[in-house]
């Protein structure tokens, strides 16, 4: 019984902390100028021949999973710098876990090597890698 008395509040506390941590991380990006997807695509992906619909799908998914407005993200955002946010006092909580597992699920569905994701250091590299994989899988 005593375990429940301690365990439930701890779980609730962790959930609340994660919720607010995501808000704090999103606030880091709030001062950035909004850039439309069209501008991001034309400046960073169009010349590479990466299909617009796939880039849009991946960009939107990344923003949703990272809980950051899509107009605040940039292709040069690095996973270990700008997009990294962990709680030093809760070292087992990484706010990028959802993103990581979504990428792993996509790799499994595409029957691709996990190293492809691990080699992506920026959001732009991630988008290019997965857009090309998706295009090949869809025969586009």
Image (cartoon, rainbow, N blue to C red):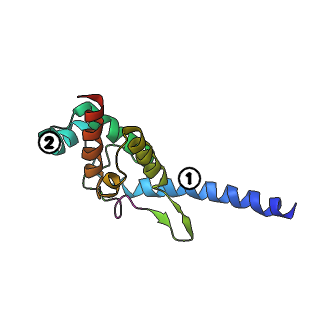
Distance, label 2 to label 1, CA atoms, is 37 Å
Question: Which residue is label 1 attached to?
Answer: 19
**Mark 1 Cα shell of 10 Å, populated few (<14), some (14-19), many (≥20):** few
User: Circle 1 sits in a helix, a strand or a loop, which is it?
Assistant: helix
Name the image quarter holding the C terminus: top left
Return the mark for residue 51: none
Q: Is residue 31 left or right of residue 140?
A: right
Question: Which residue is label 2 attached to?
Answer: 48
The foreground one among 33 and 2 is: 2
The foreground one among 29 and 7 is: 7
Q: Earlier in the sequence, mark 2 or mark 1?
A: 1
The foreground one among 79 and 105 is: 105
The single residue placed furthest to the right in the displayed view is 1
The dominant secondary structure in magenta is loop
**Mark 2 Cα shell of 10 Å, populated few (<14), some (14-19), many (≥20):** few
CB atoms of marks 2 and 1 within 8 Å: no
> Compared with residue 108, is residue 93 higher up or lower down, i.e. above or below?
below
Identified at 28% across, 56% down, the residue is: 122
User: Circle 2 sits in a helix, a strand or a loop, which is it?
Assistant: helix
Write down the quadrant of residue 4 in the picture.
bottom right
Percent from the top left, x then y, of residue 8?
75, 57
> Compared with residue 77, is residue 39 higher up or lower down, i.e. above or below?
above
Viewer-nearest of labels 2 and 1? 2
Q: Is residue 129 left or right of residue 12?
A: left
Percent from the top left, x then y, of residue 76?
24, 55
Q: Is residue 74 visible?
A: no
Looking at the rendering, the stretch of residues picked out in magenta corresponds to 79-84
Give yes or no for residue 8 being in the magenta stretch.
no
Identified at 52% across, 58% down, the residue is: 21
Q: Is residue 28 left or right of residue 47?
A: right
């Amino acid at each position: 019984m005593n375990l429940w008395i301690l365990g439930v509040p701890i779980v609730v506390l962790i959930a609340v902390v994660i919720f607010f941590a995501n808000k704090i991380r999103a606030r880091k990006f709030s001062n950035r100028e909004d850039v439309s997807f069209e501008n991001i695509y034309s400046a960073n992906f169009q010349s590479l021949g990466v299909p617009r619909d796939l880039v849009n799908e991946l960009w939107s998914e990344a923003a949703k999973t990272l809980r950051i407005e899509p107009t605040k993200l940039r292709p040069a955002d690095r996973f270990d710098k700008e997009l990294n946010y962990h709680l030093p006092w809760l070292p087992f909580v990484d706010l990028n876990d959802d993103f990581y597992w979504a990428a792993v699920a996509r790799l499994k569905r595409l029957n691709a090597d996990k190293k492809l994701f691990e080699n992506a250091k920026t959001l732009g590299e991630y988008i290019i890698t997965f857009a090309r994989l998706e295009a090949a899988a869809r025969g586009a």
